[in-house]
């Protein structure tokens, strides 16, 4: 795995966490949704508790996955910071931090640094060459 792929893992895990959080929110909404149906047919005296129980179990399982992913994200971000700190040039270090720890787009980085596109890409490329990625 090269430096770019290694550092990009942080963003992917963060996106996965956000996706799972949205799924939990959707499940919670489904679990609390109550709909009234007007009909003259007799209804069951008890609600479908099994369905509610299944939804709650899914929510708990997903929240446990999210917690594991958050632990992994915290560890990976700390490692990414350590790797980025291997780069001694502040401008190159900043490009890496903005891209891989702050998830900024290339345009946002160009504006923030006041640099042209080729300059930002050059700084990024030079910085990546200075990072020694740990072997798996």
Image (cartoon, rainbow, N blue to C red):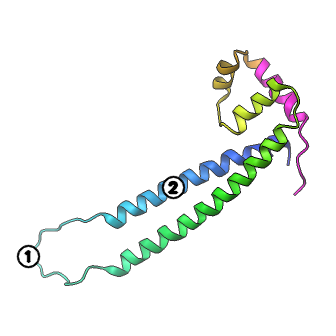
Q: Is residue 89 above or below residue 28?
A: above
Q: Quadrant of residue 61?
A: bottom right
Q: Position of residue 70 (x, y in %)?
A: 64, 56
Please identify the quadrant where the C terminus is shown: bottom right
Secondary structure beneath label 1: loop
Residue at screen point 29% across, 63% down: 33
| Residue 119 sits in quarter | top right
User: Residue 62 at x, y = what percent?
Assistant: 54, 65
Rounded to the nearest whole Å, what is the CA distance between mark 2 and mark 1? 40 Å
Residue corresponding to mark 2:
21
Quick check: 39 left or right of 5?
left
Label 2 vs label 1, nearer the camera: 2
**What is the crowding at mark 1: few (fewer than 14 residues within 10 Å), some, or many (at least 20)?**
few
Residue sitting at x 32%, y 65%: 32
Image position, residue 104 (x, y; %):
65, 32
Q: Is residue 131 above or below residue 1?
A: above
User: Which SS does the magenta portion mostly show?
Assistant: helix
Task: Where is residue 36? Give x, y as percent.
Answer: 18, 66
The disc placed on residue 77 is none
Disc 2 residue crowd, few under 14, some 14–19, many 20+, Cα 10 Å: some
Image position of 102 (left or right of 132): left
Circles 2 and 1: CB atoms closer than 8 Å? no
Q: Is residue 128 left or right of residue 102?
A: right
Based on the picture, tell me whether residue 39 belongs to the magenta stretch.
no
Give the SS element for disc 2.
helix
At horizontal 17% and vertical 81% (from top left) the residue drawn is 43
Q: Earlier in the sequence, mark 2 or mark 1?
A: 2
In the picture of the structure, the residue carrying the numbered disc 1 is 40
* Magenta stretch in the rendered image: 119-136
Q: Quadrant of residue 67?
A: bottom right
Q: Residue at x 67, y 58 (%)?
A: 71
């Amino acid at each position: 795995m090269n430096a770019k792929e290694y550092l990009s893992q942080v963003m992917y895990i963060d996106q996965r966490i956000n996706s799972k959080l949205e799924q939990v929110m959707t499940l919670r909404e489904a679990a609390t949704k109550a709909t009234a149906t007007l009909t003259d047919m007799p209804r069951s005296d008890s609600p479908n508790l099994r369905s509610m129980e299944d939804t709650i179990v899914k929510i708990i399982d997903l929240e446990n996955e999210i917690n594991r992913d958050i632990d992994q994200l915290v560890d990976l971000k700390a490692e990414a910071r350590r790797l980025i700190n291997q780069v001694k040039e502040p401008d190159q270090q900043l490009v890496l931090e903005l891209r891989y720890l702050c998830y900024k787009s290339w345009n946002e980085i160009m504006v923030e640094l006041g640099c042209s596109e080729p300059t930002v890409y050059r700084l990024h490329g030079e910085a990546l060459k200075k990072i020694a990625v740990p072997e798996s």
